[in-house]
Image (cartoon, helix red, strand yellow):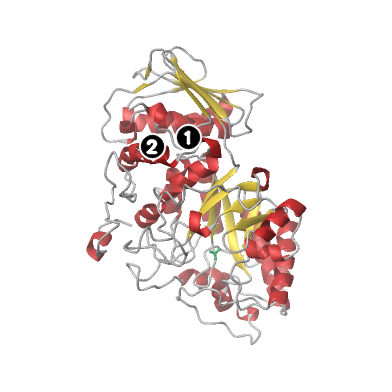
Amino acid sequence: MNTTDTLIPRPSHVALQDTPAFTLAPTARISAPAPAVPVAEQLALLLRGGTGFELPLVEDTRPGDISLEFAEAFDGGPEAYTLSVTEKGARLTAATPAGLFNGVQTLRQLFPAAVENTEASHGEWVIPAVEIADAPRFAYRGLMLDVARSFFTVEEVKEQIDLMTQFKLNALHLHLTDDQAWRIEIHDPGTEGNPSGLPYANLTAVGGQGAVEVSTAMPVRGREGFYTQQDFLDIQAYAATKNVLVIPEIDLPGHVNAALAAVPQLNADGLAKPMSTTSAVGWSTLDGSLPATYEFVREVLGQLAAMTVGPYIHIGGDEAKVTDHDDYVAMVQEFAKIAANTGKTVVGWNEYAAGELPEGSVIQYWFGDLAPVVKQAEAAGSPVIMSPAANTYLDQKYSPESPIGLEWVEGGPFTWSEYYNWDPAQGGLRDQHILGVEGPLWTETVRNNAQAQWLLYPRAVSLAEVAWSGQELRNAGDFRRRLGALGERLANQGVAFQAAPDVEWSATSAWPFPDTGTSSAPEYGTIEA
Ligand code: ACM
């Protein structure tokens, strides 16, 4: 199979050349100027694993090498790149390290799938002569991991980053707090910064011990834990090496029971709520009449902003069903202002657009009427992240027989094709309003990375192409063929993907769980956490 024909996401321009192919030899080197060395290291690590070659990093270029270069003027923005492969070598060019990183992902896919097999170390490392020029449709191409319902360790989050980046996904939204748990350390600011004496350490001491419990998941109870601020910095530093921005979310003013359980002063009666494990939603709220509420939000968002490297912090705003509407609007307006005053750009779920938001605030659309979101986007210039549940929610079951997953979104089934066959530019939204696309993985039924992978792949691959490739380039039949070819790469990486029955897979999943037929706990249990 010609690998130029199986690239995912599909590049803007691919011109296969009628000239001799490039063969990577054991003597090949990778040349890169100093600012490109971290990206060159990534490429070397990828290729060394499969080829067993040394692939030293050098500054000069000679025939047979792979070279990474910067060019100043470049069409397509900071993430664009060109890739030229001839008999004499492979040459990647971009304006930024991010562009080079994207080009590296394409180059990786041009090698035979065996390059992903770090145990084989054999093969002919031939790639066809080709000229590629590529740039993303949207700047923000994300996944969300709900680490609140069930915790993921720092190492697990890094593994998810490793997988997503091969498809040029570049944003990881971490849903850090919810009714069941609070997953991020907040330091006690000391007496002066803490007039009401709020017990911030309880957020993780109490809230970090929570998790969801649902009888349809195996095992039933979610995992406990929390990130120290250092852990969070560590995740972001790792993500940055892979061109991934981390967007942390503190969900306000609903989805807050863990905070109400940890901090008694957030309750009108001054009594801590009991922790809760239910998967029900929309039953908890902050109290907008309590000064402690604003003191708390100011401190938490202040510390969150201080530990966040990227430009965004997410303040939730979804499903505040027991909050009086006027109170809701007053609170989200104030919380958005507090968040913006930290210097960050505010992101919230689309309900929060009911309030007047600071200029440039980002709206993440997930459910309900899109019209007010379009209006805000046009009138106030609010960029939109598109996460319509029926096209992007990665927690949904593929079919009623799926052993894990939720089923509340109407429609379906929810396979790779439902997540492929849609256009983010809809309902009057145009590309210039759209920051990008995100697929949320809520984890009521997910307990480890294998299970997360099984829900993510291949649907996250569909989303990656929706977010990267121009609408005019996309074709479901062609994508299905390319997904089939991707099977061998995913299998070589040990990925537990869902073997969608309408795809001709080139290899079986590391977790070949049948998507139809009865679910089986023992099989489920064979996957290592
Ligand atoms: C959401 O799914 N509650 C944003």
Q: Position of residue 365 (x, y in %)?
A: 60, 58
Q: Where in the figure is residue 212, as x and y percent of width and height?
A: 43, 71
Whether label 1 touches label 2, CB < 8 Å: yes
Q: Is residue 449 left or right of residue 250?
A: left
Residue at the disc numbered 1: 10
User: Who's the residue at 60% across and 75% down the image?
Assistant: 321
The kind of residue on which mark 2 rests is Arg
Reading the image, the residue beneath label 2 is 482
Q: Earlier in the sequence, mark 1 or mark 2?
A: 1
Is any atom of residue 113 visible in this view?
A: yes
Q: Secondary structure at mark 2?
A: helix
Q: Secondary structure at mark 1?
A: loop
Question: What's the distance in space between the residues labelled 1 and 2, CA to CA?
Answer: 9 Å
How packed is label 2: few (under 14 Cα within 10 Å), some, or many (20 or more)? many
Mark 1 Cα within 10 Å, few/some/many (few <14, many 20+)? many
Residue at 57 percent across and 26 percent down: it is 34
The residue lying toward the viewer, choosing from 67 and 481, is: 481
Give the quadrant of residue 337: bottom right
Residue 474 is situated, as x and y percent measured from the top left of the image, at 49, 38
Is residue 326 shown left or right of residue 102?
A: right
Q: Is residue 100 above or below residue 284?
A: above
Residue lying at 72% horizontally and 68% vertically, measured from the top left: 193
The circle drawn on residue 299 is none
User: Front-most of 118 and 496?
Assistant: 496
Which quadrant would residue 108 be assigned to in this image? top left
* Amino acid type, residue under disc 1 in the picture: Arg
